[in-house]
Image (cartoon, rainbow, N blue to C red):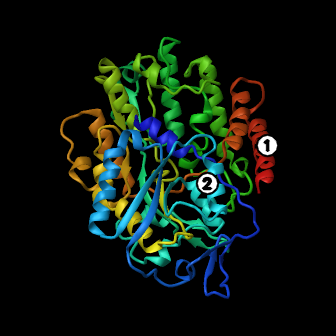
Amino acid sequence: MSAKRLTRTLTCIAVLSFAATGCGLGGGSDSGDATAGGCKVDKGNVGSGKLTGEVKGNITFQTTNLKKDFGSFFNGVISDFEKAHPGTKVKWIDDPGDATFGQRTVADAQACTLPDVLNVDSPTATSLTKAGYLLNMGVKDPDAAKPFVPAFWKSSVMKDPSGASVHTVLPWYTGGIVLTYNTDLLKQAGVDPAKPPTTLFGLFADYEKVAKAGKGKFYATMANPVWRIPADWDQMNIKTLSADGKSAVFADDPRTVQWVEWMTKLYKEGAMPKDSLSSNNDPSTLYSQGKVAYGSTNPSFVRFVQQNSPSVYDKTAVGQQPLDALGHTTGAPQYIATAATSKNAPTALAFAKFLTNAENQTAWCKDPKVVIFPTTSASLNDPFFQKVTGDDPFAQARKLVAEQLKTATAYQTNISSAVQNAIVGQVQLAMQGKKSAADAVKDAQEKANELLKQSN
């Protein structure tokens, strides 16, 4: 499995929705039990106080579409854990991660049968936490934060049923962002490859230079704004949603209209292939053919070029994606959560910590079949990421991302595909000259709010 497919598989999980009734933490019963999400659980799983109990017994561990490519690695992790804790048994479930994954997770949660330890993305973790189904690791294990990059841990919070911010997940692995470009094409356009811009609009100005030099023979980038919304806005520190996530607010920032005006101008001037406005194709093919100056921001893309187009790889360099107003990068880590409904919560929590420790994170990130990055401080300081010799673009990308992640946060805007498509559709109309940038932004916010209102 390629890193690109892996990331897509594990991040494109439906946002869960739960009925309000029966959800919540606390509420003791006559038997001395408590409830989590309406499920009867051991009272030690909820409320205040550190989780105690022996690490023993059986637990289930669920991943998404990993067994085929990484079976030996995870079986090894499981074996090591069982040897370290005699009397434990971990059953590994590898969900195919298809379109009904979200529905199955909802059904498992409401049936009180969530796996003891499960891999979740941010939207899924947010929904499960809000409904009260996940163990509050920050309370149940006060030392849980220690291995992780402080900024990642601090920003990896979800709201519990009472609205309080809690740590119900352990950061597991994440991607990275780099600026990938064809140095020959940039030089033809009069753009200095050694001096990447620090703002998005500065990057757009370089796109314009490429358009003037390319004259339809080569381009700067792809047109479809689906690749850039809300990522560009996040980096510019434009708030896409209100603090509670219930309404769209991006039209309140005048820079949003400026961004759409730039995209419209660039499309009109030929910085992007005309037929790429509604295409979901990323730059991989055209970049590998030397027809696009800027490639994907995903570090795995650099390896893709290395493997599939050596001649273009020889002209490829990487630099810092503009940090713009935000001042640092953001990641969308995958998380490991422990079910508050687990009948062996001490064992589940111990396995979650073992799986995400520095040793195991580093080992998986070194697997040649994947391009991912760890979330523990010790892993990012490993020589694998830090000792780069020569000017190999892929090695340089790995080191650059590792440095970025030391200060990165997990604060990426999460919007549903329906909301994203509604916004993108309006921007596309502006880029085609069918409405003004100001009207497109206003209409996009109205349509986004209609959809958000339906889901709240």
Give the residue displayed 67% in from the left and 74% down from the top.
162
Given the image, on which type of amino acid does mark 2 rest? Thr
Give the residue displayed 33% in from the left and 55% down from the top.
361
For residue 447, the mark is 1
Question: Residue 147, position in %: x, y?
Answer: 34, 66
Q: Is residue 443 left or right of residue 331?
A: right
Front position in the image: 249 or 190: 249
Label 2 CA crowd tier, 10 Å (few <14, some 14–19, many 20+): some
Question: Residue 408, position in %: x, y?
Answer: 43, 56
Circle nearer the viewer, 1 or 2:
2
Q: CA distance from mark 1 to mark 2?
A: 29 Å
Seen in the picture, residue 357 relative to 236 is either above or below; the reply is below
Give the residue displayed 60% in from the left and 67% down from the top.
133
Quadrant in the rendering for residue 268: top right
Front position in the image: 408 or 255: 408
For residue 105, the mark is 2
Give the residue displayed 36% in from the left and 57% down from the top.
406
Given the image, on which type of amino acid does mark 1 rest? Lys
